Structures are given as C-alpha cells and as structure tokens.
Image (spheres, grey):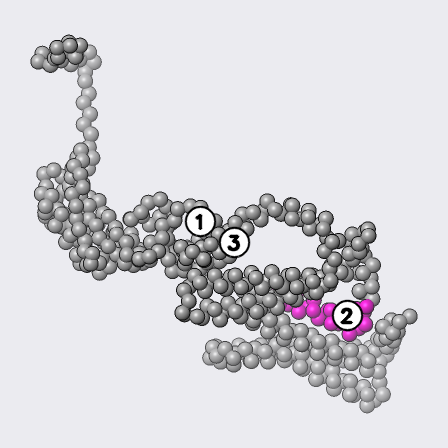
C-alpha cells in the first residue's frame, strides 16, 4: 500500500468519526456564508453603477475583487475553524485539505478570468469560463488528494492502439492538454500582436489585416507543433489514424482551404480592402444591387454591409473567381447615367437644358467634372436623352441621388410642358374575307425587268 493510499484511508477514517462530522458541518456553514458574501458583493457592484466601470482599470480591479470575495471569505473562515480545532485538540485534517482546495479554486478562477480578458469576450474561454475553471480545479484537487498517480496509472493501462506501439488513453489526454496549453499561449501572443499592428496608422488597412491574420495562423500552427512535440506523442503510432482522417476530410476542407488562400491573395494584392464600396453584378454605372461597403476581411469570408444595415458574409473565393465592381478601387468618383424619353413634339434643346438644370443644385453632384446632357437616339415613340453626372461618395448610396434628380426632372418637364411619351402599338382588325389589293403602280417582283 503506497503513501497516497494510506493518506486517503486516514482521511476517510477521520471523516467517518465524530470529529469528521463536526468538520463537515463547519465546512457547509463556511460554504453558505461564502455564497452569501459573493452575492452581496455582486449586488454592491450593481449599486456602484456604470460611473466607476467606465474606467477600464478601476472597473477590472473592482470586478476582480468581487470574484475573489467568496473564496477569501471561505479561506478565512476555514482558517479560523482550523485554529479552533487545534486549540481544542480536535481533528483538523479535513479542514486543512478543504482550505487548500478553496485556495486552488480561487487561483484557478482568477487565472481563467485573466485569460478571458486577454483573449476577449468573444473567445471560447469567455463562453466556457465556468467549465474550464471546473476542469482545472478538479485536476488540482486530484493532485492535492493524492489521486493523480492512481488516475494516471489507470488511464495509462488502457491501450488505444494494440500492437507494437503503445498509445494509451493517458497519452492522448496528456497530449490534448499540452497542445491546448500551447495553443492558448500562442493565441494570447497573436492577439497582442494583432492589437499592436492594428494601431499602426502608417500602414494601409489591408496591410495591417494581412500581417495580423498571417501572424495569428503562423503562431497557432507553431503552437500545435510545439504542443505535439512537448507531449511526447509518438506520431508513428497515429499514422493509420491520421491517414484515414486526412483522406476523409480532404474533400471536405477543399473549399475551406481555397477560401483561406483567397483571403491572403485579397490582402496581398489590395484589390479589396476595408472601406471599399463594391457590388456583385455585371452592370456598371447606376446599379446598386448587392451594393455595400467592406467592413472587415476575415480568414474565410469578407463582411459586406449594405445600406439596409444587412451584413453579408461573402466567401473569399467568390471575390476571386467572380467579377466584382469596386467603386472605390483607385478613385471614389463614379458617374451616373439617367435616361429619359421626350416626345417628337417637344424641343430637344430645351429638354437638354432642363436636364442640366435638374442636376445643378444637388449638393452631392460634382461641379468638376460638371453634369452634361446628351441626345442619344431617335426611338419609335420619342427621342432618348441622357443626363450624366459625377458623385464622389458612392458609399452614401447612388439610388437616393437618382431619385432626387428624377423628381427634379419631372418637376421641370411639367413646368415647361415637355411630355414623356409611353410606348404604344396600333392594332388593326380586318373583317373576314377582306382582300388587300396591291397598288397597280407597284412593279411585279417576278418580272425581271422590274
């Protein structure tokens, strides 16, 4: 029987004795008081209000104090109970072990909280903060109780790949824990580098995003490789398993890999960058279908926000293989065309002047180059005119400018009596048996002399 087994047996005997019952009652009372103190601390934090929490460092310190309150109260009360048991000659081993477990839980809770602050509120640690704290505390608790060696021996006896190579369940769990630790550390470093790089105003936005994403993926990959190496996992034992996984996932991750590579291409050639105004149609000039501006470039997709406030997640591969209109690639100025028809009874010169007048007072239409009007063609039911003008802020929308100018054209045409014709067709209905005679003067098509 080893030392850990002997210590566990003594602890069990003490728990079953009268002193052990008194210790358990004291521990339950301490837990209840600690829970009440924690809730009172949270209520006090709510009463403080948002005035103090607006200041980052003050708010974080107060929040840390609130988190530590129940653990500090529990540790203090258990310490008092332990000293009291010593003075009266009572058993106190359970109280000592409980005090160690409470201190370990407080340390793990603060460590996970600091890790959540480093990674951000949207990270996996923020979503699984309580679960991660519980798992880490259980690991420390097993070590304090002396059960860790027994657990290791039990899991190490379970061989996942029977044969010449030994790959036990303990080796798998240890590898996962070590790899996760390395990934978390490299992720924290990558996030810190990303914050620093994004603050460099001297670099272009696309360059900053490219450096940040490249650094992030490089460090995460390096963390995985270092974790595998530090875990001491025999990769030859996993050759068959990893080969099957790679073969099964090869077809599934093809599109994902293409999107990641396309994202780096977009960052490097700067064809699309945050702030650009783009649309996804084959039309140019006046269309606003699928129109929006680039909010951010991610590893797999681009976030495009339209004027309705809807954010579309466009895969990077679509922006590489399909035609995309970048309204602000080299110059944000764009020209809009407004076609309009007038009747043959109206004066085209007056209509052209009115088109210029309709665009002259709009605040978003440029004066250099100024608006122009053109007589484009003579159609079946009227003359086709066109107003052309430039704007420099397509990110603020183009249809609103079109609407303003069209309303002004309608108003001016109505004031000057210019009509906008509507396409019409004439239908003639012949009576049954009616014969259309050919004119006598018309030559015969079959006559060679014709």
Residue found 57% across the figure and 69% down from its top:
189
Marks 1 and 2 close (CB-CB < 8 Å): no
Q: Relative to residue 167, is residue 148 depicted above or below?
A: below
Look at discs 2 and 3 and give the one toward the viewer. Answer: 3
Q: Relative to residue 416, is residue 40 depicted above or below?
A: below
Q: Is residue 82 left or right of residue 131?
A: right
**Rendering coords of residue 171 (x, y %):** 76, 60
Residue 91 got which mark? none
Label 1: which residue? 320
Label 3: which residue? 260
Which quadrant: the C terminus? top left
- Residue range corresponding to the magenta coloring: 126-149
Q: Is residue 400 left or right of residue 360?
A: right
Marks 1 and 3 close (CB-CB < 8 Å): no
Residue found 82% across the figure and 77% down from its top:
21
Q: Relative to residue 191, is residue 236 depicted above or below?
A: above
First of labels 1, 3 by sequence position: 3
- Nearer to the camera, 421 or 347: 347
Gap between marks 2 and 3, in whole Å? 42 Å
User: Please, which residue is most extreme toward the bottom here?
Assistant: 87
**Rendering coords of residue 140 (x, y %):** 73, 72
Q: Quadrant of residue 16?
A: bottom right
Label 2: which residue? 142
Gap between marks 1 and 2, in whole Å? 53 Å
**Rendering coords of residue 70 (x, y %):** 65, 78
């Amino acid at each position: 029987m080893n030392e850990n087994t002997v210590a566990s047996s003594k602890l069990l005997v003490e728990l079953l004795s009268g002193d052990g019952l008194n210790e358990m009652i004291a521990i339950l009372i301490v837990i209840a008081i600690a829970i009440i103190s924690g809730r009172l601390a949270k209520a006090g934090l709510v009463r403080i209000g948002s005035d103090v929490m607006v200041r980052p460092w003050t708010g974080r310190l107060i929040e840390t104090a609130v988190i530590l309150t129940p653990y500090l109260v529990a540790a203090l009360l258990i310490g008092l109970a332990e000293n009291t048991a010593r003075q009266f000659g009572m058993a106190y081993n359970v109280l000592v072990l409980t005090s160690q477990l409470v201190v370990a839980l407080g340390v793990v809770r603060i460590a996970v909280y600091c890790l959540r602050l480093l990674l951000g509120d949207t990270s996996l640690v923020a979503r699984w903060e309580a679960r991660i704290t519980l798992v880490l505390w259980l690991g420390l608790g097993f070590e304090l109780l002396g059960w860790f060696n027994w657990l290791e021996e039990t899991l190490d006896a379970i061989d996942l790949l029977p044969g010449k190579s030994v790959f036990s369940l303990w080796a798998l769990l240890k590898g996962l824990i070590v790899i996760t630790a390395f990934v978390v550390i490299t992720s924290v470093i990558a996030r810190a580098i990303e914050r620093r790089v994004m603050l460099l105003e001297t670099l272009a936005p696309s360059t900053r995003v490219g450096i940040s994403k490249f650094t992030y993926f490089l460090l995460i990959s390096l963390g995985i490789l270092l974790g595998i190496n530090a875990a001491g996992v025999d990769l030859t034992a996993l050759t068959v398993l990893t080969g099957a996984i790679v073969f099964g996932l090869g077809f599934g991750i093809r599109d994902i890999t293409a999107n990641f590579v396309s994202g780096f291409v977009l960052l490097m050639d700067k064809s699309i960058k945050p702030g650009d105004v783009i649309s996804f149609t084959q039309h140019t000039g006046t269309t606003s279908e699928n129109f929006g501006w680039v909010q951010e470039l991610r590893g797999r997709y681009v976030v495009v926000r339209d004027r309705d406030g809807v954010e579309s997640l466009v895969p990077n591969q679509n922006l590489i293989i399909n035609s995309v209109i970048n309204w602000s690639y080299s110059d944000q100025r764009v020209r809009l065309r407004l076609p309009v028809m007038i009747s043959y009874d109206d004066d085209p010169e007056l209509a052209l002047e009115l088109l210029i007048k309709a665009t002259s007072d709009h605040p978003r239409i440029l004066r250099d180059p100024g608006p122009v009007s053109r007589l484009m063609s003579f159609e079946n039911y009227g003359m086709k005119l066109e107003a052309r003008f430039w704007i420099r802020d397509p990110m603020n929308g183009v249809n609103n400018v079109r609407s303003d100018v069209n309303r002004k054209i309608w108003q001016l045409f109505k004031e000057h009596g210019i009509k906008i014709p509507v396409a019409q067709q004439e239908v003639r209905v012949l009576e049954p048996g009616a014969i259309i005679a050919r004119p006598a003067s018309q030559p015969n098509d079959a006559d060679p002399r014709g």
